Amino acid sequence: MSIVGMFLGGAPNALIAAGYAQLNLQWTAQDRSDTSGAVFTITASDSTTQTVSGDSSGRAYMTVAAGTYTVSVSHSGTYENDDPQTVVAESQKSYAIIFQGTFEFDIRSTSATIPVESWADNTCTVSVSGVTATNIIWVMPAPESVNDYSVAGIVATEQSAGAITFTCKTVPTNTITINVAYT
């Protein structure tokens, strides 16, 4: 049993020679945003190992001798990798082996205050350590500020490096404490 060859891109071989099989490998990130960077490792039952990098769409194709193989994938992104998959490759057949990566959230949290005097034209920007222009944020009032936050109609309207901008329907009469969770 052996791993014969590999190729990237395009369609897999339409004609598979007798005694060989085609492995069609694919890495798909759960959020579909990052498919490049996948590295597939194919191990034959005789412990022969071959690695192949996926193309920009997370795909790779390999021609192997008929036999049993274990296929695993690793990825440079912040994804959990699926467990290895075993395939019994029969002569002149093609197999799709698809890995679905699950995004790992590294959630952090902090709090900040919005002093009454910081509002201007029903808008204020508050420094919030850890926030970037692109990370995911969840903003909620601290328990002691829920009523004032709601009555004032406060909403987060913009985020930037180290800051969140808020707008309100009416300026609150008390300092508002907010809790922020972010990735």
Image (tube, rainbow, N blue to C red):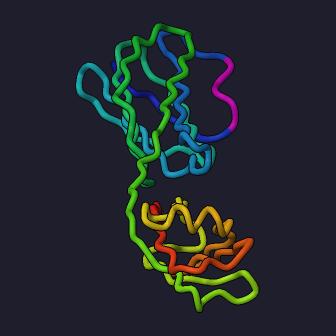
Total count of labels: 0
Q: Kindly identify the residue that appears in the image at 53 percent across and 59 percent down.
A: 138
Q: Residue at x 76, y 86 (%)?
A: 121
The picture places residue 26, in percent across and down from the top left corner, at 54, 33
- Percent across and percent down for residue 139 are 53, 63
Q: Nearer the viewer, residue 130 or 164?
A: 164
Q: Residue 9 location in percent, x, y?
A: 65, 40
Work out whether residue 19 or residue 101 is closer to the camera in this orientation and state it: 101
Residue 110: image quadrant is bottom left
Give the overall secondary structure of the magenta segment: loop
Which picture quadrant has residue 83?
top left
Q: Is residue 151 above or below residue 4?
A: below
Q: Vertically, is 36 above or below 89?
A: below
Tell me if residue 183 is in the magenta stretch: no
Q: Is residue 107 left or right of residue 22?
A: left
Residue 57 image point, x, y percent: 63, 44
Magenta residues span 10-14
Examine the rendered structure and indicate whether residue 93 appears above or below residue 43: above
Q: Is 85 located above or below residue 27 in the figure?
A: above
